[in-house]
Image (cartoon, rainbow, N blue to C red):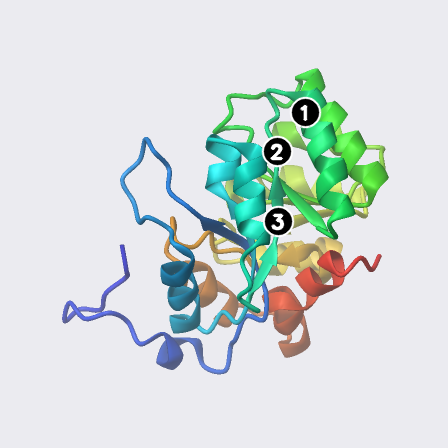
Amino acid sequence: MAIKDETGMPFDAGRLLGGLEVSLDVDVLFGAYPDRDGPPGTPGSVLALLEQHRIRSAAVASLRAALFDVRSGNDELLAETAPEVVPVGAVDLRDPVGAARELERLAAKGVRAVRLFPEEQGVEAGFPSVRHVARRAARLGLVVLTGGDVRRFWQPFAGIEARVVFLDTHFYHLGDFLVAAADEPGFHTSTRLLNSPDALELAAAELGADRLLFGSRTPHYEPLVPLLRLATSGLKPDEAAAVAGGNARRLLGGES
């Protein structure tokens, strides 16, 4: 649901956000959840919503791949030719052997990142399948974008030189992320749920702003909330620009 002002009209994002633009959103989905109310998530509607909020490109994963059929969902996404789309593969953690094979296939096609959906697939951080997929992704040089509670899901990625973006880091759990990431230079977090008054600033002070990546989960969450938090943060302009896409481009471009 779009955020509205006191008159009932949609907020003017441009007025509220000042000069902020996002060059790459790391958390966008095509498709719908079959068990939830929400938008259909068609490519055209999602890209239009991003443009409305001055989000210029997005790392996109397919809910079809995550929830219905891995291969056809990934292939459908890879066939998307919109220049704003950076394709992110998905695998089924309930099938670790098949997931490892799909990672190999995706890497051979030039895909740079894979997204994990542990909650939607009913998989826990301690399952051997998660560790297996984490190790294979690390060996292939793939960036992992993962959902799940960071207090548990940091563990399968520790000690394997993985490059990971935790998409569901809540500001209540930021301290756990900070201490885990202090020993893991490849650990990053989305800003989507870091909407407390000092979460972005604290993460930047403790780890550096290069560990923060803007994520909105468009169209299934309201993109204006993380945009406003970043626009009104105490980060320096160069730090805010890095969070708004520079860090994601570096990470997904294969740089260390």
Q: What's the residue at 67%, 60% (across, down)?
A: 248
Residue 213: quadrant of the picture? bottom right
Whether 8 is drawn above or below 165: the answer is below
Q: What's the residue at 73%, 49% (across, down)?
A: 109
Residue 49 screen position, x and y as percent: 38, 65
The residue that label 2 is drawn on is: 91
> What's the amino acid at mark 1?
Gly
Marks 3 and 1 close (CB-CB < 8 Å): no
Residue 73 screen position, x and y as percent: 52, 41
Q: What's the residue at 52%, 51% (across, down)?
A: 194
Which of the marked residues, 3 or 1, is nearer the chain's N terminus? Answer: 3
Q: What's the residue at 71%, 17% (across, down)?
A: 128
Crowding at label 1, few (<14), some or many (≥20) Cα neighbours within 10 Å?
Answer: some
**Residue 73 vs residue 34, the one in the foreground:** 73
Which numbered disc covers residue 88? 3
| Residue 155, visible in the rendered structure | no
